[in-house]
Image (cartoon, rainbow, N blue to C red):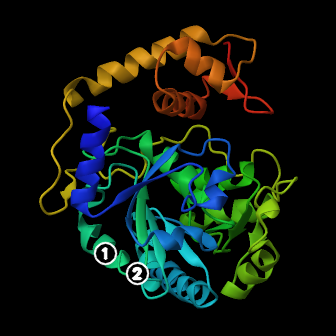
């Protein structure tokens, strides 16, 4: 309890607040996905969380044409009433946020809200907060690790009625976002590109697999207009792409980090950053222990998440985070109704 109060006070000092699953300000689209986080840390205008959102994602090493198209697309979508969601990465993400500053943009961070990556985008994030917001499911003081970027990507798609992939190589985090969107029953759009440009390979493949071709904002607006304001339509019965679309199983999950391996570059800190919570030095050891416990409790027979939480003796938040990590790694699988089982192999 004391640790939770310290976290809340630290977020208040930063100018933010927590929004819990089930509260009125919790994003309705995100609430509809299986792995909705129980708690979101929010900076900026929380009201943008309740507006219809569209995700724009793509290459960090974007082309000039890709950046120009992204800016035009984000601006037009904003004028059509959509909040533009992205992951604050370099390239396409940066262009999408920058072009939608005046109409509302939502940045989803892979680490804590006081740990900005890449560091050069801290000024952009601060500008986003004037008419938009930033969110994270991670605690303050936690710098993003490799496995945190796919976790963030499923929030980007989960917040949005549709996801637009502008430029993406065959092995990229943007395709992970597209796969999450497809699994969540959301619409997936892809911008076609030259077959001679490796940055267009991922988008072209998505179109081949059933994604909607996007050559202008009108293509997105027309497809999403019937879904706006219809909560029942947030989880369509059938995905718009074939099963497995966007999958690149061999890709490294830390492809957004600029340094080799899985360790990120130094984070950009907000002014007067909040102190690390007590016991944070042993957080990695604790995570490994929870991971081993969850794996030991899971077998071939599917069990509910509630049963797993009760059996583990850990908090629901810790178990949910561990389950998502293991699911992304392919160590466990989720069955209809949300039951979980271990993948034997």
Secondary structure under badge 2? helix
Question: Looking at the image, can residue 229 be seen?
Answer: yes
Q: How many marks?
A: 2
Q: What is the quadrant of residue 54 in the picture?
A: bottom right
Q: Residue at x 57, y 12 (%)?
A: 311
Q: Is residue 219 left or right of residue 263?
A: right
Q: What is the quadrant of residue 148 in the picture?
A: top left
Give the residue furthest to the right. 237
Q: Residue at x 59, y 54 (%)?
A: 177
- Dot 1 surroundings within 10 Å: few (below 14), some, or many (20 or more)? some
Secondary structure under badge 1? helix
Which x, y percent locates residue 258? 31, 53
- Which label sits on residue 100? none
Q: Residue at x 71, y 78 (%)?
A: 214
Which x, y percent locates residue 285? 31, 19
Which quadrant, please, contains the N terminus? Answer: top left
Question: Looking at the image, can residue 172 be seen?
Answer: no
Which x, y percent locates residue 231? 76, 63
Q: Is residue 281 above or below residue 74?
A: above
Q: Is residue 252 left or right of residue 127?
A: right
Q: Are marks 1 and 2 in contact (CB under 8 Å)?
A: yes
**Nearer to the camera, 185 or 199:** 185
Q: Is residue 318 left or right of residue 111?
A: right
- Dot 2 surroundings within 10 Å: few (below 14), some, or many (20 or more)? many
Q: Which residue is mark 1?
A: 124
Which quadrant, please, contains the C terminus? Answer: top right
Q: Residue at x 72, y 51 (%)?
A: 184
Q: Is residue 309 above or below residue 209?
A: above
**Gap between marks 1 and 2, in whole Å?**
7 Å
Q: Which residue is mark 2?
A: 98
């Amino acid at each position: 309890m004391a640790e939770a109060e310290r976290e809340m006070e630290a977020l208040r000092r930063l100018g933010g607040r927590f929004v819990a699953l089930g509260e009125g300000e919790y994003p309705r689209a995100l609430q509809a996905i299986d792995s909705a986080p129980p708690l979101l840390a929010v900076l900026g205008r929380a009201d943008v969380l309740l507006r219809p959102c569209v995700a724009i994602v793509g290459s960090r090493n974007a082309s000039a044409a890709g950046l120009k198209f992204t800016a035009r697309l984000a601006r037009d979508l904003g004028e059509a009433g959509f909040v533009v969601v992205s992951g604050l990465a370099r390239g396409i993400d940066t262009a999408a946020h920058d072009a939608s500053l005046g109409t509302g943009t939502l940045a989803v961070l892979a680490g804590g809200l006081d740990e900005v990556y890449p560091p050069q985008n801290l000024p952009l994030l601060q500008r986003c907060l004037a008419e938009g917001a930033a969110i994270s499911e991670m605690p303050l003081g936690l710098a993003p690790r490799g496995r945190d970027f796919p976790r963030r990507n499923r929030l980007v798609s989960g917040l949005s009625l549709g996801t637009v992939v502008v430029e993406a190589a065959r092995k990229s985090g943007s395709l992970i976002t597209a796969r999450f969107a497809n699994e969540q029953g959301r619409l997936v759009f892809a911008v076609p590109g030259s077959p001679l440009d490796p940055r267009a390979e991922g988008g072209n493949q998505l179109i081949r697999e059933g994604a909607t071709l996007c050559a202008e904002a009108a293509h997105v607006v027309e497809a999403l207009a019937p879904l706006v304001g219809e909560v029942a339509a947030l989880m369509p019965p059938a995905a718009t792409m074939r099963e497995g679309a966007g999958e690149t199983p061999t890709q490294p999950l830390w492809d957004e980090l600029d340094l080799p391996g899985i360790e990120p570059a130094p984070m950009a800190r907000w002014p007067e950053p909040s102190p690390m919570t007590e016991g944070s030095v042993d957080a990695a050891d604790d995570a490994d222990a929870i991971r081993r416990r969850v794996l030991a409790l899971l077998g071939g027979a599917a069990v509910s998440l509630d049963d797993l939480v009760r059996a583990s003796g850990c908090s629901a938040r810790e178990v949910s985070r561990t389950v998502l990590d293991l699911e992304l790694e392919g160590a466990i699988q989720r069955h209809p109704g949300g039951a979980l089982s271990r993948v034997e192999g």
